[in-house]
Image (tube, helix red, strand yellow):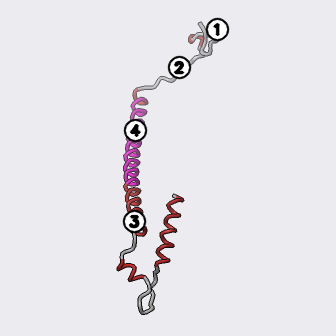
Amino acid sequence: MSGPNGDPNISPDDGIINDEDDFGEEEYSAINNMLDQINSYLDDLEERNDALNGKLHELMESNRQARLEFRAQLLAPPKEEDVEEHCPTADGESSSTSKEDINEDKEGLQMNDMNI
């Protein structure tokens, strides 16, 4: 008979191979309990991961919607009342935002969109 590595003339009766790996019921029970506990921890971790992943997707979608709405507001043609509020008036006073500022903002957004 061949040995564990194919060596000839070695038998388990020669005393070279010891099978002292015999575990009692207590050891198997303890191992099973540990494996059950590990499995429980892994299940809990998986549930938390799924919940965080779902929240992340919700946040990303909300952020995307807010960005689209903001972009639509900035790229939409200004209403007449908005232009009157932000452009120089007949008496020569000007407000903080001009048509040029609005156009510069639109160009900046368009450049940012290209980088995304």
Q: Residues within 10 Å of mark 3 (few under 14, many from 20)?
A: few
Query: Left or right: where does residue 98 sit relative to residue 10?
Result: left
Which residue corresponds to mark 1?
Answer: 8
Which numbered disc, 2 or 4, marks the residue that appears first in the sequence? 2
Kindly report which numbered mark, 3 or 1, lies closer to the viewer in this rendering. 3
Are dots 1 and 2 in contact, CB under 8 Å?
no
Inspect the image, locate mark 4, and give the three-letter code of the amino acid beneath it: Asn
Which numbered disc, 3 or 4, marks the residue that appears first in the sequence? 4
| In this view, 38 is above or below 9 | below
Label 1 vs label 2: CA separation? 20 Å
Which residue corresponds to mark 2?
Answer: 19
Residue at image position (40%, 50%) is: 53
Which residue corresponds to mark 4?
Answer: 39
Inspect the image, locate mark 2, and give the three-letter code of the amino acid beneath it: Asp
Q: Position of residue 29 (x, y in %)?
A: 39, 31
Q: Residues within 10 Å of mark 4 (few under 14, many from 20)?
A: few
Kindly report which numbered mark, 2 or 4, lies closer to the viewer in this rendering. 4
Residue at image position (47%, 23%) is: 22
Whether residue 96 is in magenta: the answer is: no
Q: Which residues are magenta?
A: 28-57
Which residue corresponds to mark 3?
Answer: 72
Q: Residue furthest bottom?
A: 91
Label 3 vs label 4: CA separation? 49 Å
Q: Position of residue 71 (x, y in %)?
A: 42, 65
Inspect the image, locate mark 1, and give the three-letter code of the amino acid beneath it: Pro
Tag 2, which secondary structure?
Answer: loop
Residue at image position (42%, 63%) is: 67
| In this view, 94 is above or below 22 | below
Label 3 vs label 1: CA separation? 82 Å
